Image: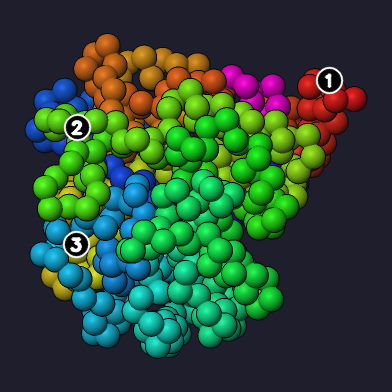
C-alpha cells in the first residue's frame, strides 16, 4: 500500500509525467512463485533487452524505497495481510530500526538518487508503531543530508493510531498520508480487524475527520476483495462523498492459503503448495473487471479532473505513450526497493523472501545494491517471462502483464500468466473509446474533462 504524490495525466493540459517513481504497492501478497524463481525452468528469462532498457541504465539514478522501520509489526490482524507472516522469516518479534541504522539509511538514500527531488516512503506493517519521536529524528536527518535536494515524505497507515499530535507532525512537514480503508463499514470490517477481532471502521473514520480538521493531505488505498464485487459504484461514491478522497487506489486481493496448526488464521502460500486453496476473500477475475468498469462509468460522466483513480490515470498514460507511474503497469519493474527494519533490501514489497534478498545497507550502499545485476534482472523478468499470448495481445501496451504477484496461471508456452487477465481484458475493452477521446483531447492541448459530455451521450444520459 502506498501513498501517492504525483501529477495525474488527467489534471494536466499536456502529457504530465508523475513526480514519483513509486509503485502501487498494496497490502497484497505475492506468496506465489515470482518472476525470477530459479526452481521453475519455464521461467528462465527470454533474451530480450530493449533500447529503453539501455537508456534506463545510462540515465541518472532515480529510484524509490519503501522503508519498514518496524518491519511487519502491526496493531491489526487483517485477514488478507501477507506481511504479518514476515515476522516468522525474521525469527519472531521484530525490533524498531535503530537510530544508527536510520541515519545510515537516510544518508545513503539521498546520496544514491541523482535527481533534485527525493521522496521517502514510510511503510509497514504499521509505520506509526516506532512513535512520533522516531519521525522527528528522521526529519532532522533528512535536513542534515539533503545537500540541496528537495525532500518529500509519504506514509501509509491503517489510521487506528493517529491522534492530533500525528496530524500536527504530518501537516507541519507536508506529509502525504495514505489511509487504508476498504469501503463502507460492512466491507471494511469484514477483514480489517484488531488482534482481538474487533472492527476498525469507526476508528479510521475518526482519523479521516482529524485529517480534515488538521489540514493533512491524504488519499486512500482499498483492497478489492470478494465483498467488493458488484458494489464498485457504491464504493466509489462512498470515497468521493463521505471520505472525500481526491485520489483513490483500488488493489485486488487474489491469493492462496493453507491451514497450519498453531496459526490462528490461514497462511498465504504458493498455489503449488499441497493443500493450497483460493483464499475465501479473493476477488474473481470477472468480478474485478466489472468492479473497475462500474467505477469508471461513475467517474467518466461527472468527475474527470476532480477525482483521480490510480488505475484510470495509469491507463490514460499508457494510451498517451507516457510512463504510467505505477510499476504494475510498467514494462519492467524493480525501481522501488524495500528496506527492512534491520537493513535488508529487496527488489519489491511483494517479494520479501530469502531468495530475493539483494543485500544489507550495513554491508553495501543502497546505490551499489540498486545497480546490482540481481536487481536489474528481477525488473526485466516482469516482461521477459510473459507468455507468448500476452506479448501478442492487443492490450499488452496498456496491461504489460500487470503485477507478477498475480501470475498464478500458465500460458500455452508454460510461462506464468496473470490470473486476473479476464477482468483486465474486460476493463481495457470497456474504457478504450473514452481513453482514445481523452488522448485526442490532450493532443490538442485540451482538458481531458471534455470527455464527460462524450461519455454522457455515449451512455444515453443526455
Give me the residue at 53% from left, 48% from top. Answer: 186
Spatial separation of the CA atoms under disc 2 and disc 1 = 46 Å
Earlier residue among tags 2 and 1: 2
Foreground tag (2 vs 3)? 2
Q: Position of residue 461 (x, y in %)?
A: 85, 25
Circle 3 packing at 10 Å, graded few (<14), some (14-19), many (20+), is some
Of all residues, the one furthest to the right in this rendering is: 462
List the residue tagged with mark 2.
Answer: 276
List the residue tagged with mark 1.
Answer: 460
Earlier residue among tags 3 and 1: 3
Give me the residue at 48% from left, 23% from top. Answer: 286
Q: Position of residue 256 (x, y in %)?
A: 26, 35
Choose between 462 and 20: the one closer to the eye: 462
Picture quarter with the N terminus: bottom left
Asked whether, in this view, residue 104 is left or right of residue 426, the answer is left
Spatial separation of the CA atoms under disc 2 and disc 3 = 21 Å
Asked whether, in this view, residue 185 is left or right of residue 53, the answer is right
Q: Mark 3: which secondary structure?
A: helix
Choose between 407 and 376: the one closer to the eye: 407
Asked whether, in this view, residue 72 is left or right of residue 401, the answer is left
List the residue tagged with mark 3.
Answer: 87
Q: Which portion, as a residue range, is magenta?
A: 429-435
Compared to residue 266, the image places residue 147 above or below, namely below
Q: Mark 1: which secondary structure?
A: loop
Choose between 294 and 302: the one closer to the eye: 294
Q: Position of residue 280 (x, y in %)?
A: 34, 35
Asked whether, in this view, residue 177 is left or right of residue 212, the answer is left
Give me the residue at 49% from left, 38% from top. Answer: 227
Amino acid at each position: 500500500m502506498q501513498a501517492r504524490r504525483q501529477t495525474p495525466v488527467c489534471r494536466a493540459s499536456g502529457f504530465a509525467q508523475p513526480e514519483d517513481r513509486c509503485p502501487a504497492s498494496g497490502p497484497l501478497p505475492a506468496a506465489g512463485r515470482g518472476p525470477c524463481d530459479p526452481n521453475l525452468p519455464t521461467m528462465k528469462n527470454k533474451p530480450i533487452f530493449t533500447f529503453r532498457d539501455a537508456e534506463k541504465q545510462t540515465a541518472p539514478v532515480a529510484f524509490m524505497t519503501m522503508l519498514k522501520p518496524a518491519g511487519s509489526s502491526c496493531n491489526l490482524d487483517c485477514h488478507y495481510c501477507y506481511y504479518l507472516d514476515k515476522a516468522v522469516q525474521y525469527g519472531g518479534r521484530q525490533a524498531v530500526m535503530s537510530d544508527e541504522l536510520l541515519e545510515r539509511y537516510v544518508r545513503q538514500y539521498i546520496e544514491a538518487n541523482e535527481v533534485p527531488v527525493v521522496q521517502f516512503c514510510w511503510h509497514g506493517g504499521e509505520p506509526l508503531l516506532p512513535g512520533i519521536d522516531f519521525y522527528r529524528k528522521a526529519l532532522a536527518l533528512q535536513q542534515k543530508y539533503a545537500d540541496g535536494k528537495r525532500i518529500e515524505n509519504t506514509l501509509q497507515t491503517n489510521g487506528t493510531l493517529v491522534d492530533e499530535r500525528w496530524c500536527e507532525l504530518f501537516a507541519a512537514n507536508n506529509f502525504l498520508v495514505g489511509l487504508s480503508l476498504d469501503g463502507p463499514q460492512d466491507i471494511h470490517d469484514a477483514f480489517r480487524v484488531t488482534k482481538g477481532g474487533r472492527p476498525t471502521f469507526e476508528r479510521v473514520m475518526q482519523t479521516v475527520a482529524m485529517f480534515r480538521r488538521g489540514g493533512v493531505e491524504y488519499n486512500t488505498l482499498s483492497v478489492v476483495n470478494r465483498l467488493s464485487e458488484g458494489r464498485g459504484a457504491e464504493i466509489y461514491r462512498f470515497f468521493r462523498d463521505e471520505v472525500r478522497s481526491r485520489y483513490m487506489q483500488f488493489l485486488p486481493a487474489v491469493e492462496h492459503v493453507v491451514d497450519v496448526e498453531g496459526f490462528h488464521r490461514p497462511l498465504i502460500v504458493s498455489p503449488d503448495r499441497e493443500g493450497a486453496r483460493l483464499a475465501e476473500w479473493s476477488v474473481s477475475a470477472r468480478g474485478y473487471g466489472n468492479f473497475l468498469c462500474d467505477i469508471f462509468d461513475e467517474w467518466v460522466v461527472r468527475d474527470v479532473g476532480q477525482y483521480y483513480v490510480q488505475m484510470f490515470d495509469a491507463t490514460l498514460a499508457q494510451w498517451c505513450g507516457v510512463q504510467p507511474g505505477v510499476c504494475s503497469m510498467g514494462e519492467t519493474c524493480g525501481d522501488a526497493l524495500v528496506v527492512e527494519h534491520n537493513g535488508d533490501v529487496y527488489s519489491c514489497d511483494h517479494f520479501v523472501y530469502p531468495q530475493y534478498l539483494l543485500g544489507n545497507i550495513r554491508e553495501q550502499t543502497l546505490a551499489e545494491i540498486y545497480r546490482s545485476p540481481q536487481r536489474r534482472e528481477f525488473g526485466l523478468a516482469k516482461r521477459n517471462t510473459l507468455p507468448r499470448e500476452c506479448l501478442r495481445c492487443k492490450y499488452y501496451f496498456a496491461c504489460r502483464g500487470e503485477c507478477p504477484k498475480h501470475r498464478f496461471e500458465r500460458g500455452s508456452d508454460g510461462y506464468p500468466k496473470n490470473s486476473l487477465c479476464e477482468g483486465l481484458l474486460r476493463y481495457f475493452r470497456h474504457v478504450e473509446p473514452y481513453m482514445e477521446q481523452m488522448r485526442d483531447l490532450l493532443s490538442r492541448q485540451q482538458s481531458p474533462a471534455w470527455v464527460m459530455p462524450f461519455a454522457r451521450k455515449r451512455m444515453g444520459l443526455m
